[in-house]
Image (spheres, grey):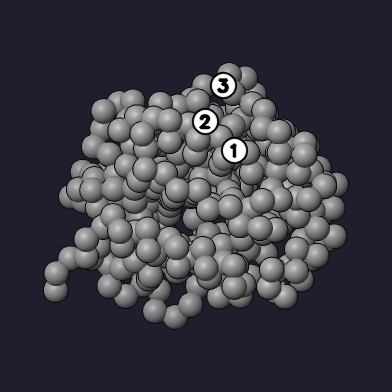
């Protein structure tokens, strides 16, 4: 464990997690500015990044188009985290910008509708709408990679499950950081890792779940842990050993393996929830990003120049 990781874990566990534990979420819309603004301050996009707003389709879902240098290798469709009630394409634009620079891709970061104003399956409907529009605009499916973190990671996997179920052209691959895959919250780590978790209070996860999907949580489009991933493209998952959502990744990776999917699960020791967002500041985050770049290069052939 790097020295910076030790410091980060200490700060998160003894400052941020207690705040989240005490924070009343009776009206998430009122809390969004309080939680989203610090993300903008902490995770500013570096020079050379071009960000434009768009809607996909033209009268549809708001997205950010993010490029950083060469962008000929395809499209990265990114779904942000935030427990389905917080976050936006803006809060996660730095991590998307870094990934598209590493991979030479164009990033499409989706502002899917949030709960409780828009309950399940609104977020998934927005994600599939954007995916289909990317295809319509001329990008072939084998040049699309789907990705996300936390709830967005679960949404990315739910999107993949829906693509497969509907027989749509499947993407080249998918990767996710600390994905939330089981809205029934049945993983043992929800209890066994409560003390070791550096960031997420389980009671707030349950609260967010009820805002987004108050019933029918076993629906595979809400909980991709229960989806059918036969014939899925390669998948790369990351999770920390101490996370309460650890078993969400372990179990879906096992399920995918049983279905013949080329899936890789990287479990990092003592890392907080979605630690790759600290790339450039944390050794373990940079390592995860390097593994993402290797994964992308392994499934996408660069365009000849």
Residue at 52% across, 30% down: 225
Extreme residue toward the top, this view: 216
Mark 1–mark 2 Cα distance, whole angstroms, equals: 7 Å
Q: Residues within 10 Å of mark 1 (few under 14, many from 20)?
A: many
- Disc ID at residue 288: none
Q: Nearer the viewer, residue 78 or 102?
A: 102
Q: Nearer the viewer, residue 137 or 299?
A: 299
The residue at which mark 2 appears reads as: 225
Q: Is 93 displayed left or right of 24 in the figure?
A: left
Residue at 39% across, 79% down: 48
* Image coordinates for residue 34, horizontal then vertical, percent: 71, 56
Q: Is residue 115 above or below residue 36?
A: above
Count the labels in the image.
3
Q: Nearer the viewer, residue 33 or 236?
A: 236
Residue at 21% across, 43% down: 136
Extreme residue toward the left, this view: 305
Of pointers 3 and 1, the one earlier in the residue sequence: 3
User: Which quadrant would residue 127 be assigned to in this image?
Assistant: top left
């Amino acid at each position: 464990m790097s020295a910076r990781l030790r410091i980060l874990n200490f700060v998160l566990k003894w400052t941020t997690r207690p705040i989240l534990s005490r924070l009343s979420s009776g009206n998430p819309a009122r809390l969004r500015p309080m939680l989203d603004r610090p993300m903008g301050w902490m995770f500013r996009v570096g020079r050379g990044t071009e960000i434009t707003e768009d809607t996909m389709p033209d009268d549809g879902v708001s997205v950010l188009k993010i490029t950083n240098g060469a962008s000929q290798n395809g499209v990265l469709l990114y779904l942000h985290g935030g427990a389905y009630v917080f976050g936006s394409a803006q809060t996660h634009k730095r991590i998307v910008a870094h990934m598209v620079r590493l991979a030479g891709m164009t990033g499409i970061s989706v502002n899917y509708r949030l709960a409780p104003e828009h309950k399940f399956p609104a977020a998934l409907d927005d994600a599939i709408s954007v995916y289909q529009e990317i295809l319509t605009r001329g990008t072939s499916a084998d040049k699309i990679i789907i990705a996300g973190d936390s709830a967005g990671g679960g949404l990315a996997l739910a999107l993949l499950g829906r693509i497969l179920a509907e027989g749509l052209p499947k993407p080249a691959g998918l990767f996710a950081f600390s994905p939330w895959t089981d809205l029934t919250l049945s993983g043992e780590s929800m209890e066994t890792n409560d003390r070791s978790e550096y960031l997420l209070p389980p009671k707030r996860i349950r609260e967010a779940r009820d805002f987004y999907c108050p019933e029918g949580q076993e629906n595979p489009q809400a909980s991709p842990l229960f989806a059918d991933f036969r014939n899925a493209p390669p998948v790369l998952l990351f999770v920390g050993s101490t996370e309460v959502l650890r078993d969400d990744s372990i179990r879906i990776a096992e399920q995918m393996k049983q279905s013949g999917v080329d899936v890789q699960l990287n479990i990092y020791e003592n890392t907080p929830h979605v630690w790759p967002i600290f790339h450039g500041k944390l050794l373990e985050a940079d390592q995860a990003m390097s593994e993402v770049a290797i994964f992308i290069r392994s499934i996408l052939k660069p365009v000849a120049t």
